[in-house]
Image: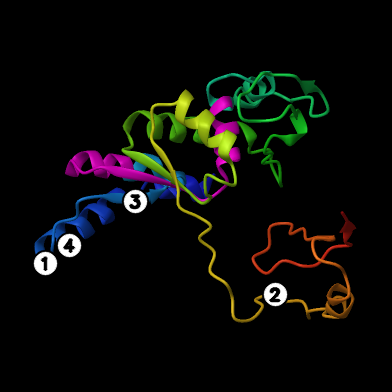
Amino acid sequence: MGFFEALDTIPPQLEELLHRLNRDGPPVTCLISDIAITVPTQRVADKFKIPRIAFYTCSASFQLLVSYVVEGKRTSAKLALEGLQKERTSLFCDILPGLPSLLNRDLPDWNHVVDDNAFMWRLISQTWQQSEHRAHAMVINTFKELEAPVFQALLEGFRLPMYGIGPLAQPLQKSTSLWREDETCITWLDKQSPLSVLYISFGSIVGAFCPSLHA
């Protein structure tokens, strides 16, 4: 909570930067900022009368789910927004265009040392509503061919124009993992027929070969 609340203090410094850039060079004509800092940066963009583009670093599918949550189209989301305990094993067969049926446990959960769910869902609700109604557009770290039904649902259901500009992760010349790489699987992989091994990454930039599933 302290981290996100601290982000609300950046407008004076951002305004000073924009004034300096406008004075010393070509004027700033657009502001692109992470959706997590929508509130302070949208305020500055409105003050300078320039369009703001919201940058969403997650998938379009997650953005669509968040938008449905904020719009109150999932019962479990209403509980989360109210800060109530949600039954995470229940299945809500909501008709959500672009997404499969989801369990409550599939919803994001910010319950670490303390339960931050109520705070985070209020923050997400505020940032999404401001972005949808005040941002010029949204750019997402994905591409349409990867999430075509999701993009279709986003474009049909919401006012905000959305564009896929990803993937943005650049290929690394060497691993950034703190673990020593296990390359013993490479010999085995080289012996497999084409399209017979499924590669799964659990969110790391470098990734790892998991126990392989044969097609």
Q: Position of residue 155 (x, y in %)?
A: 45, 30
- Cα–Cα span, label 1 and label 3: 20 Å
Q: Relative to the observer, which residue lies in front, 1 or 56?
A: 56
Q: Residues within 10 Å of mark 2 (few under 14, many from 20)?
A: few
3D distance between C-alphas at marks 3 and 4: 15 Å
Q: Nearer the viewer, mark 1 or mark 3?
A: 3
**Does residue 152 appear in the picture of this structure?**
yes
The range drawn in magenta is: 42-68
Please identify the quarter of the rendering in which residue 204 is found.
bottom right
Is residue 60 shown above or below 170?
above
Label 4 Cα neighbours within 10 Å, binned few <14 / some 14-19 / many ≥20 = few
Q: Of the numbered discs in the image, which one, if any, rests on residue 21?
A: 4
Distance from label 3 to label 2 (Cα)?
Answer: 30 Å
Specify which label sits upstream in the sequence, 2 or 4.
4
Residue at 46% from the left image edge and 33% from the top image edge? 128
Q: Camera-side residue: 16 or 27?
A: 27
Sequence order check, earlier mark of 1 and 3? 1
Residue on which disc 2 sits: 177
Mark 1 is surrounded, within 10 Å at the Cα level, by few (under 14), some (14 to 19) or many (20 or more) other residues, namely few
